[in-house]
Each structure stands twice: as C-alpha cells, then as structure tokens.
C-alpha cells in the first residue's frame, strides 16, 4: 500500500475539484459579463454582501465586476423549491443531473495542469491512454442530456434530448478523427508525453491546424454551446432537456456544461497549445522549484481561460445552425476532411522517416 | 409555379465560413472593448442616473398652497368626480367643520386622499380644478412597503406639492380662446 501516493492523489483531487468548481461558478459570471459587454451593457454589477461597501476602492470595484454574483446565484439555486413534476420517470429524473456533471469532472483527471511540484507530477492520473480515456468519458456526457430529456416525459425535453444525442454522437466521430494526426505526429497517447513532445518541438497547432479547427468546432458541438446548442434551443424548445428541472437539479446542468467547456478547453490547450509550456523564459522544461511549478500551473490556467473566453465570445456572434446543416457539417464536411487529414499527415510522416 | 431563385455559388474561400466567422468576431470584439474600456454602455443605471423628463411630462398629482401658505382646495369634489380610476377621495368638512384657512373660500377639505396605486396620471383633476389647487408634478417614483403607505393624505400632498400663488385660470382661458379664434393661422 503506497500511502504517499494515496495522500497526494486525494490532495490533488480535492484541489483540482475545488478549483474547477470555482472556475465553473466564475465562468457563469464571465459569460454574463462578456455577453453584456458585447451587447453594450454593463452586466451584473449590484450584488455584494453588506460589509463590502465599507472597503475603499476594492469593494466597489469587486461589486462592479460582479465578483459576488456566483455566490448569489448559487444561494438562489439552493433556496429554490426542488419540484418534481408528477409525470416524470423519477429514477432517471434524479439520475440525469448527476450523469451530466460527472463525465465533465472525470475528464479533468488525465489533463496535466502543471509540470511537477516537488516530486509530484501535476496530473491526477498520468494514464498512458489519456486520450482514449478522455474520449470514452466524453461520450458518456450525452447520457446526462438524453436521460434528462427522456425522464421529463414531456415533448420539448424529449426533442432536445433526441437532437443532442444525434448531434453529440455525430461530432464525437469527427472529434476523435481530428486528434489522430496529433497522435501520429507526437507518437504518444499519454497527454504528458504529448506536452513533452511539444516542449522539444513546436506547438502542435503549427503541425496540425486543420485538426485544431475540427477539434474546436466539435468541442462546441460536444459541449452544446451556441451555434450548436440544439439540446437547449431556448427559442425553439423552450429550454430543451432541462424544462422540467428546478432548483439545484437544474443548476447541475449548466455546471456540467461549463465543466465540460473547461475540460475541452484544457484538452485543446494540452493537445494543440503546449499545455503548461511556454517557449520562452525557460518555462518549457519541467520545473525545478515550487515557484516554477506554480508558474506552469498559472500558464496552463491562463491558456485555458483564453479558450473559455473564445467559447463565450463565439456564443454572441453565430446564430444557431439548422438541424440538417449541423448534420451536413458533421458528416459530409468534417468526417471526410478529418480522414483526408489523417491520410496526408500519415503520408508526410512516412516520406520524412 | 414555384419561383426559382438563382443563387450565385460562393467562391471557395467564402464557403469555408471562416471569413464570416472572423468578421463576426471582429464586430463583437469591437463592441466588447468599446463597452469595457470606452465606457460606451447604453444602459442607464437607474437609481444613480435618472432620465431628464420632457417639459410637458405628467407625473403624480399633488395639492398646492397659495402664496400665503394656505390650502387652495375648496373641497368642491370635482376632481373626485372626474377621476377615471377613482383614486381621489375627499372628505368634506361638513356643516360645522373647520373653516377654510384663506379668505374668499367657504371651506376646505377635512381630508384629501390620493391612492397612488390607482392614479393613472391622466391630469383630469388638474384640468377640472376651478381653483388651480391640484397640479401634476414631474414625480413618478413612489415607494412604499405596504398599500396603506401608497395612499397619500392631505398633509403629505400639500407638503409635496409646494406653492403656486395666485389664480391664472381666467387669463389662461382667455389665451386659449384667442388661440382658438386664430387657429388656422392667418398670415
């Protein structure tokens, strides 16, 4: 029994879970603020606990940027009535929110969020088949939404569930195909290994830009973000799969969505943008001191937040696709493109070897 | 017969969607930076910022005092009668009630209540008042914690209304009549 391993793993899980949940809460706030700014509004800027106004300068500033909004939102979710409609299939109805959140959280386990601190690698599970694990878990994400749509026993959630199941399954294929060139180039399925490869060469975006574009768009589809938010489709389905949910059970769905966004942002950073490395200031080597280890984590988080902003930014710009356009894009454009991408990459690698 | 719309086939670059997507990102990004750093938000943040009302704005009706600080209202109850939502309730002084506090007036109301929850700011009370004792002020924000708070009594209405001295009624009527006579303006 390796107690050292167990203790450090528990600590890492706790810290990563805490950080992820905080980031989920503040992603919601960021979404609201960025949405507001894009639409020429100031956004949420009023919520604050009573003592905050006595803090000079910092207090009003935090209130102004909506720093306390997530707390209010969370509190509101907990205090609302948790209503279970009469006609729902109870077991699935209770299960669905959990199933929506858990895969998103599990994906994060294999993403290396830093190099080393002391003797510990900054990744919860350094799997040799990291990417396979990720895709396996991401495919589970569809169950949350489909179960929610089915359990509600009402037409709009049902339509939302059906749409999203077709959508997520279609785009998983394009997504899976798009990373194969990355694996071919890096020659490794281990995410830490891919980062090390990128540290010695250039970032993989330089070698596989088409992979990145396909992966990015598929990530939007996988996380049910606009322009692919068919599961929710506010204007068409009155909210889609989560119509019948209330209180914290409802809040679990956005939490799962944002956690999935963070996870796919992390995946994009790891696969295409060099993970925790930066090509200057010696940040591309595993850290020798705690300070450097911390710097690596910060670099990773900064890159991840950049992709979160892209996720949010795109939402306020592209209108929702039509359902057939979505399928067309997934099956008739991305799948052949991804296959061609694999073929060309393989040929180029073969010729150079 | 169906109409066939000839759609020009877009060039390859356009069909990639990417130029359009990047163009859109530029537009939204520009708005973001303008709002965030240029302070160009169109929102008016209400309790701190208030809009300027136009000159003819009809707000809440209040009772006014004359130049000596006396009640102008003579309890004729015309406004109570004309009020469409029945927001006004006047209690007359009765035969042995209090005397009017100004000369040339027979009486004044013992109580004068306007229910601000009912009032629709139509201005009929101001129009009908023979003594020019009630005016619509430019006041639209009423706050109360219960329904009783929103029924304004005579004291409150008088203190909110302020002072409007003299009676301009006949002068105004004359001007109105003159204006009507030359209505189609002769040059």
Image (cartoon, rainbow, N blue to C red):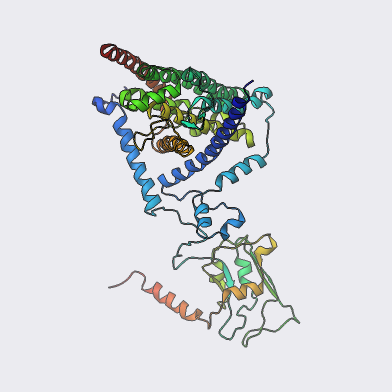
The image shows residue A68, relative to residue B12, as above or below, that is below
> Which of B49 and A308 lies nearest the eye of the viewer?
A308
> Which of B10 and A250 lies nearest the eye of the viewer?
A250
User: Residue A42, image x and y in percent?
Assistant: 46, 51
User: Residue A277, image x and y in percent?
Assistant: 39, 32
State the quadrant of the C terminus of chain B.
bottom left
State the quadrant of the N terminus of chain B.
top left
User: Residue A124, image x and y in percent?
Assistant: 54, 27
Q: How many marks?
A: 0
User: Who's the residue at 53% across and 48% down the image?
Assistant: A67
The image shows residue A155, relative to residue B123, as above or below, that is above
Residue B98 horizontal side relative to residue A41, left or right: right
Extreme residue in the right direction: B96
Extreme residue in the bottom direction: B103
Q: Quadrant of residue B109?
A: bottom right
Residue B67 horizontal side relative to residue B3, left or right: right
User: Who's the residue at 42% across and 20% down the image?
Assistant: A175
User: Who's the residue at 61% across and 75% down the image?
Assistant: B159
Residue A213 horizontal side relative to residue A128, left or right: left
Q: Is residue B118 visible?
A: yes
Residue A16 horizontal side relative to residue B156, left or right: left
User: Who's the residue at 41% across and 19% down the image?
Assistant: A174
Q: Is residue A154 visible?
A: no
Q: Quadrant of residue A274?
A: top left
User: Residue B160, image x and y in percent?
Assistant: 59, 73
Q: Quadrant of residue B21?
A: top left
> Which of B72 and A303 lies nearest the eye of the viewer?
A303
> Which of A325 and A104 lies nearest the eye of the viewer?
A104
């Amino acid at each position: 029994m390796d107690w050292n391993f167990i203790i450090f793993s528990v600590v890492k899980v706790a810290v990563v879970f805490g950080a992820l949940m905080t980031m989920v809460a503040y992603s919601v706030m960021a979404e609201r603020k960025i949405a507001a700014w894009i639409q020429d509004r100031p956004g949420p800027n009023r919520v604050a606990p009573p003592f905050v106004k006595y803090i000079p300068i910092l207090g009003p500033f935090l209130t102004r940027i909506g720093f306390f909004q997530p707390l209010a939102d969370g509190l509101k979710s907990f205090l609302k009535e948790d209503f279970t409609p009469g006609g729902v299939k109870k077991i699935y109805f209770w299960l669905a929110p959990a199933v929506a959140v858990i895969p998103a959280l599990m994906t994060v386990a294999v993403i290396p969020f830093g190099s080393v601190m002391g003797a510990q690698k900054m990744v919860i599970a350094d799997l040799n088949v990291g990417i396979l694990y990720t895709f396996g878990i991401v495919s589970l994400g569809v169950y949350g939404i489909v179960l929610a749509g089915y359990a509600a026993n009402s037409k709009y959630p049902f339509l939302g569930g059906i749409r999203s199941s077709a959508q997520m399954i279609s785009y998983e294929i394009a997504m899976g195909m798009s990373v194969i060139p990355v694996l071919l180039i890096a020659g490794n399925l281990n995410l830490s290994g891919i980062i090390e490869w990128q540290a010695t060469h250039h970032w993989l975006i330089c070698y596989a830009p088409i992979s990145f574009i396909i992966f990015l768009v598929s990530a939007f589809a996988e996380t049910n973000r606009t322009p692919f938010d068919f599961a929710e489709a506010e204007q068409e389905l009155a909210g889609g799969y989560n119509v019948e949910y209330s209180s914290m059970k409802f809040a679990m769905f956005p939490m799962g969505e944002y956690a999935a966004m963070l996870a796919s942002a992390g995946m994009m950073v790891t696969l295409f943008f060099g993970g925790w490395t930066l090509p200057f200031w010696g940040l591309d080597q595993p850290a020798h001191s705690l300070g450097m280890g911390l710097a690596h984590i910060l670099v990773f988080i900064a890159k991840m937040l950049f992709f979160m902003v892209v996720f949010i930014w795109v939402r306020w710009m592209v209108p929702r696709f039509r359902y057939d356009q979505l399928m067309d894009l997934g099956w008739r454009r991305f799948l052949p493109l991804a296959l061609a991408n694999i073929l060309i990459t393989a040929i180029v690698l073969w010729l150079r070897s | 017969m169906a109409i066939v719309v000839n759609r020009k086939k877009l060039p390859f670059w356009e069909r990639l969607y990417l130029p359009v997507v990047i163009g859109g990102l530029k537009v939204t990004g520009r708005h973001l930076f303008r709002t965030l750093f240029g302070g160009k938000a169109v929102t008016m943040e209400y309790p701190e910022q208030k809009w300027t009302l136009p000159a003819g704005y009809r707000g809440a009706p209040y009772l006014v005092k004359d130049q000596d600080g006396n009640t102008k209202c003579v309890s004729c109850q015309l406004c109570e009668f004309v009020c469409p939502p029945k927001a006004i309730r006047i209690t007359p002084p009765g035969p042995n009630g209090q005397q009017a506090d100004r000369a040339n007036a027979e009486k004044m109301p013992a109580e004068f209540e306007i229910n601000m929850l009912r009032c629709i700011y139509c201005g009929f009370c101001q129009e009908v008042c023979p003594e020019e004792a009630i005016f619509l002020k430019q006041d639209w924000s009423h706050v109360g914690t219960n329904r009783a708070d929103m029924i304004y009594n005579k004291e409150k209405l008088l203190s909110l209304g302020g002072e409007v001295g003299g009676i301009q009624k006949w002068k105004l009527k004359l001007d109105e009549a003159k204006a009507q006579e030359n209505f189609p303006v002769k040059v």
